[in-house]
Amino acid sequence: MSNHPRDMTYDMASDHVYEVYHAVTNNPSNMAGFHAHDYYECYLYLSGNIDIAIEGRLYTPKPYDMFIFPPGVMHRWVAKAPVGRYERVFFYITRECLESMSTPEFSMLDILDSAVEHYAYGFHVDVRAGTGLIALADEAIRYSNLTEPADRLLARCMVNMLAVAFCRLVNPGAEESFSIPGRMREIITYINDHITEPLTLDGLAEHFFVSKYYLLHAFKEYANLSVYQYILSKRIMLAQRLMRDGATPGAAARASGFGDYAGFYRAFVKQTGVTPQAFCNGGVNQPETKRESPSSGS
């Protein structure tokens, strides 16, 4: 697994708390659709003719641009022909793991959360800092492929160092420039702000004075996801957060905008691979489909 590694800790046998990838794809043909995680993804772009969309913002990255994909925030990469060699380093890490790896004087969770509060998602780092991040990721991957207990501990140490190095480079005052694709930022912001309320295609089209045809096709072109799928995914992510904070499945369903529990149950199982009750019981940290392949990362 040297190119598509997966890191796990020994102290949570059935749950992942971090994963590290150094992935290379030559001329990828599949464009990822908008998706979100219930954990942080920290991403370093290296090469490839792509754009990166984070909800209503579109970035054209340069080598050694790094990005924060926060829990619940939809994002995707968008291929531009020819893509060429698409190379990136990224790691997933749960909020709980960030807390455990931090100190009161250097809270990595507070650093990332503060950037997100300012909608600061993308930053440029210099070559030296970027190559340092790559080296730490590759070392974490190398140790995770070894079998001695000490090697697994060293892998975790490397992930800790990688997270610290990334957070030291986060500067909300120096965000990368981005473009706004059409009216998508307004539409996505409106949906996000009203996600717990009834949302219909007719209502959105009327609110923004556009036709349903335009809304359907413009949104699909930008997100590679339908308006309905976007709303459903955001509501499931909200329900996950509420249940993690102690809400029952029924209460989470109501609070996240679902009209009935049966619809919530079906959507939750389809998106996460587990039932709401199993999620509440700690049976999973993140959906299986988000763990297995680096192609599901951005």
Image: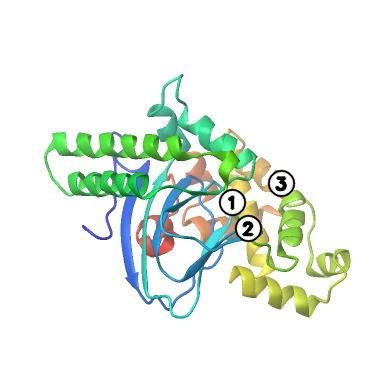
Query: Is label 3 or label 1 in front?
Result: 1
Which kind of residue does numbered mark 3 sit on?
Arg
Outermost residue on the top side: it is 104
Q: Is residue 274 left or right of residue 53?
A: left
Q: Is residue 213 left or right of residue 47?
A: right
Q: Are marks 1 and 2 in contact (CB under 8 Å)?
A: yes
Tell me the tag on residue 55.
2
Quadrant (top left, top right, bottom left, bottom right) of the C terminus: bottom left
Q: Earlier in the sequence, mark 1 or mark 2?
A: 2
Residue 119 at x, y = what percent? 63, 45
SS under mark 3: helix
**Label 2 environment density (alpha carbons within 10 Å; few <14, some 14–19, many ≥20):** many
Which kind of residue does numbered mark 2 sit on?
Glu
Tell me the tag on residue 146.
none
One can see residue 16 in this view: no
Q: Is residue 274 left or right of residue 219?
A: left
How are the colours assigned in the image? rainbow
**Label 1 environment density (alpha carbons within 10 Å; few <14, some 14–19, many ≥20):** many
Q: Are marks 2 and 3 in contact (CB under 8 Å)?
A: no
x 73%, y 54%: residue: 189
x 61%, y 68%: residue: 223
**Residue for badge 3:** 254
**Residue for badge 1:** 73
The Cα–Cα distance between marks 3 and 1, rounded to whole angstroms, is 21 Å
Q: Earlier in the sequence, mark 2 or mark 3?
A: 2
- In the rendered image, the vertical position of residue 228 relative to residue 147, given as above or below: below
Query: Is label 2 or label 3 in front?
Result: 2
